[in-house]
Amino acid sequence: MSLTLDVGCGFNKKGDIGIDYSKNSDADLICDAHFLPFKESIFSEVRSEVVLEHSPNPLDFIKEQYRILSPGGKIVLITDNAQFYFWSVMRNWIL
């Protein structure tokens, strides 16, 4: 059986299960993407669209998606503003 998880689904879930941090969404579960409430290796696809750049810890965000991914599965990670995280961190050092 193949399952797809949509991380940060908002109002446009693409997959079998959608999660979001916001209660104002169509998510099946409200949770933090850095601490997913799933067993290891159960999803054949984990996707997130325009979510990574809002993460306070992108590496942990991706590691958690990898943890629940089945062997041979795929992570679909789309961002529309990859430099957002860089500038949000660097501005604290520059300003």
Image (cartoon, helix red, strand yellow):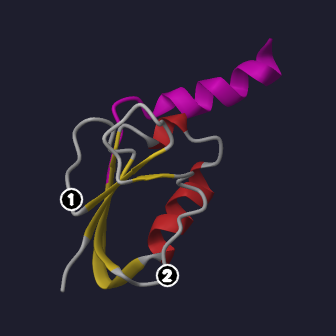
Where does the C terminus fall, quadrant-wise? top right
How dense is the environment of label 2, judged by Cα within 10 Å: few (below 14), some, or many (20 and up)?
A: few
- Looking at the image, which is closer to me, 72 or 3? 3
Task: Determine crowd level at label 1: few under 14, some 14-19, many 20+ residues with C-alpha closer than 10 A.
Answer: some
Residue pushed farthest top?
95
Residue 90: give x, y in percent of width and height. 71, 26
Image quadrant assignment for residue 80? top left
Q: Residue at x 39, y 45 (%)?
A: 8
Look at 53% across and 35% down and name the residue there. 54
78 is within the stretch colored magenta: yes
Mark 1 or mark 2: whose residue is earlier in sequence: 1
At label 1, the amino acid type is Gly
Looking at the image, is 84 positioned above or below residue 21?
above
* Residue range (magenta): 77-95
As drawn, the label of residue 31 is: none
On the image, the x and y values in percent for residue 60 come to 61, 59
For residue 47, which quarter of the picture? bottom left
Q: Which residue is identified by label 1?
A: 15
62 vs 93: above or below:
below
Q: Residue at x 60, y 62 (%)?
A: 35
Residue 4 in picture, x, y percent from top left: 25, 67
Give the residue type at disc 2: Lys
> What residue would you read off at disc 2?
39
Magenta part mainly helix, strand or loop? helix
* SS at mark 1 in the image: loop
Q: Residue 42 lies in what quarter of the image?
A: bottom left
Q: Measured from the top left, where is residue 65 in percent x and y?
A: 46, 66
Q: Is residue 5 magenta?
A: no
Residue 43 sits above or below residue 35 on the image: below
Q: Give the structural element (helix, strand or loop) at label 2.
A: loop
